Amino acid sequence: MATSEPTAAGGDQDPNSANLRPSSTNYDAWMQGCTRKLGMKICGFLQKNNSLGEEGRLAGSLSERQKNLFSSVNSDRDARFRRTETDFSNMFARDLLPAKNGEEATMQFLLELVDILTNYVRKTFDRSTKVLDFHHPHQLLEGMEGFNLELSDQPESLEQILVDCRDTLKYGVRTGHPRFFNQLSTGLDIIGLAGEWLTSTANTNMFTYEIAPVFVLMEQLTLKKMREIIGWPSGEGDGIFSPGGAISNMYSVMIARYKYFPEVKTKGMSAAPRLVLFTSELSHYSIKKAGAALGFGSENVVLLSTDERGRVIPADLEAKILDVKQKGYHPLFVNATAGSTVYGAFDPINEIADICEKYNMWLHVDGAWGGGLLMSRKHRHKFSGVERANSVTWNPHKMMGVPLQCSAILVREKGILAGCNSMCAGYLFQPDKQYDVSYDTGDKAIQCGRHVDIFKFWLMWKAKGTIGFEQHIDKCLDLSQYLYDKIRNREGYEMVFEGVPQHTNVCFWYIPPSLRGMEHNSKEYREKLHKVIVIPSSNFSNVPEMLFHYSKYVLFPSHPAGGAQYQSNDDGVWYDHGGLPASGPEGQLLPHGHLQPCSPPVRH
């Protein structure tokens, strides 16, 4: 039986109750507002005919009446939303709203669920808790202490549903934990979490203004602000939130193709010559995936050479464009990466833009990882030339700490997004509605139904302000500098490249004593070092308080410079954990930001 004691005592307000208030209370609040407005009008009328003393007496009487009304409402709410001991073992989903007399059961169930969620949030920020209670797939599939993943024909009780909720969190990964160092998750922002809860409660769609009026306007205003930050003219351009950076990058390729060869939309790829895309050898794989999915073919995605810091070499781009043209193909699109996945490198946008203008090509900037730096006056110079791009991908769910998912594709040319994707479905996008149908954004998306990704981001922006995001980004970069300074001269460690990291990616190798005398460019050295690096990721039982990731070329404990966590990660401690090789102090310095120890590729 899932039971609990009341969380409010002595008539105190339950802080969770505001989101669970029934419609009757909304009516009461509306009545209070009407009463207040009517009272003010009466006072204004009497002011012309009575003394100021009499006016003050009436105003005081009105104020006292309002206090009594609010007190009555609060008392009623406290009684209604006080958690009580409830037996959920004989209750089922059919007993909840909209069932008749289901309000009390619904409130108690939701309050119990809120308790589960808030306890999880509290433990997420506790460094003494595990990042992951790891079990192998076969163990979870077989069932764990009453937690069964199999679906049944008969309904489960609400008690079992609550147990399932607890266990889902118990056996999952705490991505907001201070010791979570996996791919590009950014802690747990409480305002963003609140926004996501509200979004799920509203449960609406983003295809038309009539079904999501507030969210559509929030999206329009936020995208406009983002375009202004990029540096495009006010009022120009367009954009939309997509399911992630890979889809945003795919949008950019689709729009580029439509810009230069619009007939492809109706006639297919036969209406265009052989088109070629260009991107860094260190760019995200989504560009190659877009080439495959959109009919270009992965062989028509040309990879560009990079320098020792991981940045595209412009001369190599121009040489490969000329080579493509000589073969009779059409160079269409260049992707410049702003914050590469491994090195955190920023391609030279201005130099690439010069080449794109010379050969009349579309320039896209993939700022999925690095986009947050546009918020920082100190660091946005790394995006120099971004205003010359035709399109930009920017993922607030990465560097800015917005809960997943939140990715924007932004385009400089107004109307091209709709031109590329619209199909004018008459049952959704009627042109004769009683409002400005330009706010019906669904037809310019490749989806029909679209999740509300904007509210949590908008709410965080309201809570932090632009200056708050700037401080957040600056702090993250300061932490990467701190880590770099700690590691670069430490015995047994070697930086992958010289110089301060461009982003929060701090790339280094740990060199165990047995390998320090070997030739670093030899195959044997690289293979042995890679095996050393893999150990901590494969031994979850010995490292329960943290989570790493590795790949063939890079061990990637990817924690973007604190994300929402940087506030609690600046203590400068040496952290001792089993299984990870170290020298000097008994442990390895762990990141106060984004840590990226690399196993060695061949040096440039």
Image (tube, rainbow, N blue to C red):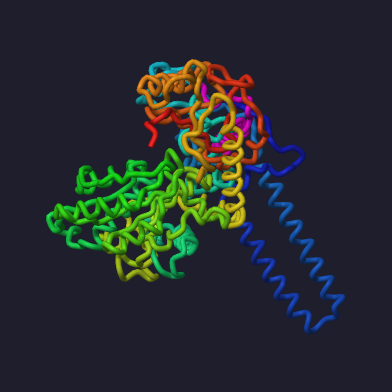
Q: Is residue 387 above or below residue 576?
A: below
Residue at 30 percent across and 59 percent down: it is 362
Comparing 514 with 578, the one in front is 514
Residue at 42 percent across and 31 percent down: it is 554
Q: Is residue 60 above or below residue 561?
A: below
Is residue 190 visible to us here?
Answer: yes
Comparing 245 with 32, the one in front is 245
Magenta stretch: helix, strand or loop mostly: helix
Comparing 359 with 110, the one in front is 359
63 lies left or right of 27: right
- State the residue lying farthest toward the right: 53
Comparing 346 with 89, the one in front is 346
Find residue 280 and report its horizontal and vertical position in percent: 34, 46
Is residue 205 visible to us here?
Answer: no
Q: Is residue 330 above or below residue 100?
A: below
Residue at 50 percent across and 52 percent down: it is 455
Find residue 464 and report its horizontal and vertical position in percent: 61, 53
599 lies left or right of 110: left
Residue at 52 percent across and 42 percent down: it is 499
Range of residues picked out in magenta: 104-133
Of the 4 image quadrants, the one containing the N terminus is: top right
Whether 312 is among the magenta residues is no
Find residue 208 and report its horizontal and vertical position in percent: 37, 60
Choose top left, top right, bottom left or bottom right for residue 566: top right
- State the residue lying farthest toward the left: 270
